[in-house]
Image (tube, rainbow, N blue to C red):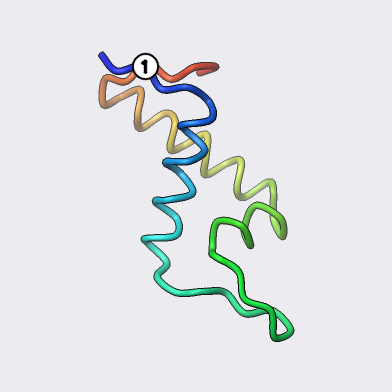
Amino acid sequence: MDKVTEAELVEFYDQMLDEAHDGLVTICGYEYVPSYALKHLDPIAYNTGLDDFADSMVRDGHEVEGY
């Protein structure tokens, strides 16, 4: 069983979001990676997705710090 730290969990989740939603998000001419935009524009949605992602990692046999 792999142990995943909370920092690694966030890194993996952000990477998954950015790869799943290829490209940048443009807001008023400024460009952001999808994970950054979601985290800052809708932190509730970001954290809900992060919790779901952590649950899926636990179901896959990983030990996730804090979950």
How many discs appear? 1
- Please name the amino acid that badge 1 sits on: Lys
Q: Determine whether 60 is above or below 52 in the image.
A: above
Position of 44 relative to 62 (above/below): below
Q: Residues within 10 Å of mark 1 (few under 14, many from 20)?
A: few
Give residue 27's position: percent from left, percent from top: 69, 79
Relative image position of residue 40 (x, y in whole percent): 71, 55
Quadrant of the rendered image containing residue 1:
top left
Say which residue appears at 30% left-offset and 24% top-offset.
59
The residue lying at 52 percent from left, 44 percent from top is 49
**In the rendered view, does 11 fall on the left or right side of 42?**
left
The x and y percentages for residue 58 are: 35, 22
Helix, strand or loop for disc 1: strand
Q: Residue at x 61, y 57 (%)?
A: 36
Q: Residue furthest bottom?
A: 29
- Residue at x 61% of width, y 41% of height: 47
Q: Quadrant of residue 19?
A: bottom left
- From the viewer's perspective, tell me whether residue 58 is left or right of residue 24: left
Residue underneath mark 1: 3
Q: In the drawing, does residue 16 fall left or right of residue 51?
A: left
Q: Position of residue 48 (x, y in %)?
A: 58, 41
Q: Nearer the viewer, residue 23 or 51?
A: 23
